Image (spheres, rainbow, N blue to C red):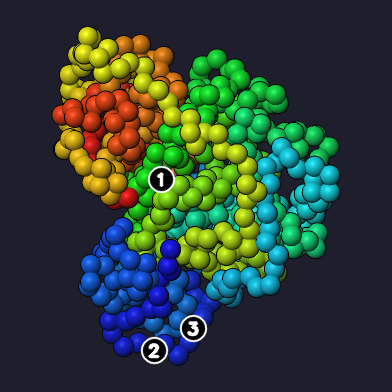
Amino acid sequence: MASISPLSFVSSVNASATKTSSSSLFPKGRQSHVAATKVSCNASNEEASNGIAHGNRRDVLIGLGGLAGAAGFAYNPFAFAAPVAPDLQACGLPTLPAGAKPVKCCPPASTKIIDFEFPKNQPLRVRKPAHKVTGDDLVKYKEAIKAMRELPDDDPRSFTQQAAIHCAYCHNSYHQVGFPDKDLQVHYSWIFLPFHRWYLYFYERILGSLINDPTFALPFWNWDHPDGMEIPSIFTDRRSSLYDPLRNANHQPPVLVDLSWNRNGPDTSGDVDANLSLMYTNFVEVKAPLNFFGNAFRAGDTPYTVKTGAGTCESVHNTLHTWSGDRTQPNGEDMGSLYSAGRDPLFYCHHSNVDRMWNLWKSFGNKDITDPDFLESNFLFYDENKNLVRVKTKDCLDSVKLGYDFEKVPIPWAKTKPKARRTKAERAQKPLTTKSVDLPLTLEENKLVSTVVKRPRRSRSRKEKDEREETLVLEIEFDRRKPIKFDVLLNEEEDAQFATPKNREFAGSFVNVSHTQKSSALKTELAFKIGITEKLIDLEADDDDSVVVTLVPQYGDGVIVKGIKIDYEDC
């Protein structure tokens, strides 16, 4: 899709300078009260790139990065867009979970920030499945990680500093430019995918530079294919630079990944068919961008509110984190806790596949978010030359333009649609008897909760369904420090606890990776959303006035369900 055009202004400003080392935008004590103007999914690429929707020109100041990059730019209260950005000067100590050793996660100080430029005249780096990495490719990978581990800890390219990036952006080290009292969090919102893409982009380039190989490409953990559904063997050699001792001892090869893993259930090898079905549910049938990426997160927003929430891509990603981490550690370190996940080389291989999911989702005909606040959101990373670089989401939408792509491998889950447990005729013989329950309610482990949810509309046309995805929205409150998982079923009462991702009634799962936040705000509120358009069609329930929603707690207690409703998201 087209990127946002050069800045246009609603008032005259001094635009003589184009770059600065300042990371602040607003004068002290002032905050931006701005409202983003929506760019319709139906707007043309040209209209979107020029900030025009429905024929109305949007003369806006777009992008905190763009504004911070122009010396002398004053705060403009009429700006429409408010993309989020980290305040480097305000980076501080992270808030860590109980049992974690104190650690500093902020990057080395710098007096200069440069704006990202696309690489020129470089070969395309092709990322391969990790279980296929052998020979010279494996030797180079080990050498590159070894070289990174040997760098001094204060070198921004070092293994220590690279791991700290995730900690800083996930554990309240950063605040938002212009909003010193607002934390910057890269999970549970639409910046999850672009942040991690940029993170891996620089990590990969640093590794390549350390072994003087511009073709070096980071492998991806192919956990969505039967051949890759175990921890790749290249990470299990104790003598290798790719090894990390803090992993779940019960999940070593040949144990298969369980993409719907219940940490309180039997710790058995995963079910291939269930994994493939879950992939279909989370990646094939989800059409609305906000249901895939996550909810909006704009400058001045507080993380962990009902305005934010993860998309289906992040939900699957979370399970892999908890499944891989060492259960004997206080917080499931390394992979099982966000502050420590970057210490395991497996983390980057895992996220390489998450990044691949973004490309695959778009290959199914879906489109990126066009909201300027998404496109202009920006982050800071050190590159292979120790330069501190400011990057924007709009520049990472096309991985090939960034200089890398993924080896084409089979995706069997693309056609593995789950099947309904009962037909409409069978349901008619034994109709659902669930009644609405009073909210809020608290979920308890091993105790199912079912309720009736009214649908605003039924029997929509195919065109209406293609344009707007019917979406189940659960407004929940929970303790971020606890690993949590509950499943969501549709029109399923009888033996609901036995439903699996192989069943069409299985709608999705909410999964929380052990995390922490400030002691004054231990409770987190999020909107958990699931696209249900295609599910209702397959369940022969598209003509029904309501749907029965069953919540199946798997692990973690204290989740409060404050609201359940059905809404619509633009596709």
Q: Is residue 333 left or right of residue 305?
A: right
Tell me if I can see residue 210 in this picture. Answer: yes
Point out the image quarter for the N terminus: bottom left
Disc 2 and disc 1 in contact, CB within 8 angstroms: no
User: Disc number at residue 292?
Assistant: 1
Q: In the rendered view, would you say 26 is above or below 549?
A: below
State the CA–CA distance, disc 2 to disc 3: 10 Å
Quadrant in which residue 71 is drawn:
bottom left
Label 3: few (<14), some or many (≥20) within 10 Å? few
Residue shown at 50% from the left, 66% from the top: 395
- The single residue placed furthest to the top in the displayed view is 429
Q: In the rendered view, would you say 475 is above or below 67?
A: above
Q: Which residue is under mark 3?
A: 18
Quadrant in which residue 270 is drawn:
top right
Tell me if I can see residue 304 in this picture. Answer: no
Q: Secondary structure at mark 1?
A: helix
User: Disc number at residue 14?
Assistant: 2
User: Disc number at residue 530?
Assistant: none
Q: In the rendered view, would you say 503 is above or below 47?
A: above
Q: Nearer the viewer, residue 404 or 466?
A: 466
Label 1: few (<14), some or many (≥20) within 10 Å? many
Earlier along the polypeptide chain: callout 3 or callout 1? 3
State the CA–CA distance, disc 2 to disc 1: 40 Å
Label 2: few (<14), some or many (≥20) within 10 Å? few
Disc 2 residue type (three-letter): Asn
Q: Nearer the viewer, residue 74 or 232?
A: 232
Where in the figure is residue 208, as x and y percent of width and height? 74, 59
Quadrant in which residue 329 is drawn:
top right
How many discs appear?
3
Earlier along the polypeptide chain: callout 2 or callout 1? 2
